[in-house]
Amino acid sequence: MSEPDADSYALKSAQMAEVPAPDLPYQPPTPRNPPPIALIGAGGIAGAHLDAYRTAGWPVVAIANRSLPRAQSRAAEFFPEARTTTEFQSILDDPTIKVLDITPHPADRLPLIEAALKAGKHVLSQKPFTESLDDAERLIALARANNVHLAVNHNGRWAPHLAWMREAVLSGQIGTLTSAHVQIAWNHTWVEGTPFEQLPDLILYDFAIHWFDFLATLAPGRLQTVTATSTRAAGQTAKTPLLAQALVTLDGGQASFAFDGATAHGPRDTTLLTGTHGTLHATGPDLGQQQVTLTTAAGRAAPSLTGTWFNDGFRGAMGELLCAIEQNRPPANAAETTLPTLALTFAACASARQNRPIETGTIRALPKP
């Protein structure tokens, strides 16, 4: 049997023709007549929410927080005319407020979402949506019973590069997805001294969930098993592990994720998607600066994307909910759509704890320490 030549070992790449990139609907949706919004929880991430809504011109009429000075500070910075309060019930009792953006951490957020749905309010929940599939399914049923929309702030769905690549995959630009590989090196040590430092599965649960969600929306119904690990980086001082990785088997494919959250210098973010008819690649120094290419038999296309994850992603998550309310249809980020994401995330955390592959869907809740 003769040996293959050097080209067969992928040692040489072919020169590709430059072709126009397909025009894909990746931009955040924009409602025509947004209803009044109230923000519940004025913590760290609330600034990104409020900045996105201010930029979009959407009316935030109230901000509620356990600390009134914190709510007042947020209002002064973004929406000076907004009412501020520590009384969540006063928001629920206000018939003019139609939409609540609820941002606290999952355990604190759960009863707030439940009360809001019972009060007939549409809700955008921060992610991760819940700490168990049982709670998620219960809230979804409650929203249906009260004829209101319940969406999840998976803002990464409207990060320009991820949104464009998703639309490319779902519209068949690369055929059937066969692999997805994500590698991110960045400095996540900002969590020191914050409540996030107390999460033993911080990277896999709170950070990686964006990319687990990306995979779940790229390959619906195809997730099979996940094998994950997490560990502390040499020299790190944060309590929670800042390094994590995961391998996911798909029906007819595979995915890998490497998260290096203790990278002090030279950050890099890359995403590679391969399919039966093409390849997508994105790379850049961070989440907000990404260059995307699409390569098929026709040639190589490089779309000129506008916007950044912060804050177009946040504008997309709320904008999709507002458009769904306006058009009387389910939002694309409805809570139902996050169930496979949660199942994969819980399984990854369990795998890292148990040091074994886990079948997605078999772990119903975030493993406890």
Image (cartoon, helix red, strand yellow):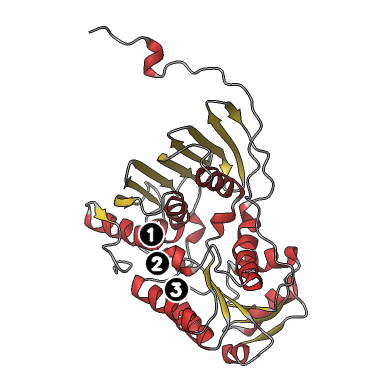
Disc 3 residue type (three-letter): Pro
Q: Secondary structure at mark 1?
A: loop
Disc 2 residue type (three-letter): Gln
Coordinates of residue 334 in the picture (x, y in percent): 51, 67
Q: Secondary structure at mark 2?
A: helix
Q: Of the two numbered discs 3 and 2 on the same chain, state the one appearing first in sequence.
A: 3
Q: Is residue 21 above or below residue 9?
A: below
Coordinates of residue 105 in the picture (x, y in percent): 47, 73
Residue 19 in sight: yes
- Residue 60 relative to residue 262: left or right: right
Cα–Cα gap, marks 1 and 3? 18 Å
Which residue bears the numbered disc 2? 198
Q: Is residue 126 above or below residue 211?
A: below
Report the number of discs: 3
Whether label 1 touches label 2, CB < 8 Å: yes
Disc 1 residue type (three-letter): Thr
Q: Of the two numbered discs 1 and 3 on the same chain, state the one appearing first in sequence.
A: 3
- As drawn, the label of residue 240 is 1
Q: Can you say which quadrant of the picture contains the N terminus?
A: top left
How packed mark 3 is, by other alpha carbons closer than 10 Å (few <14, some 14-19, many 20 or more), is: some
Q: Secondary structure at mark 3?
A: helix
Q: Is residue 60 above or below residue 348?
A: below
- Please report the residue visible at 53 percent of the width from the left and 81 percent of the height from the top: 147
- As drawn, the label of residue 106 is 3
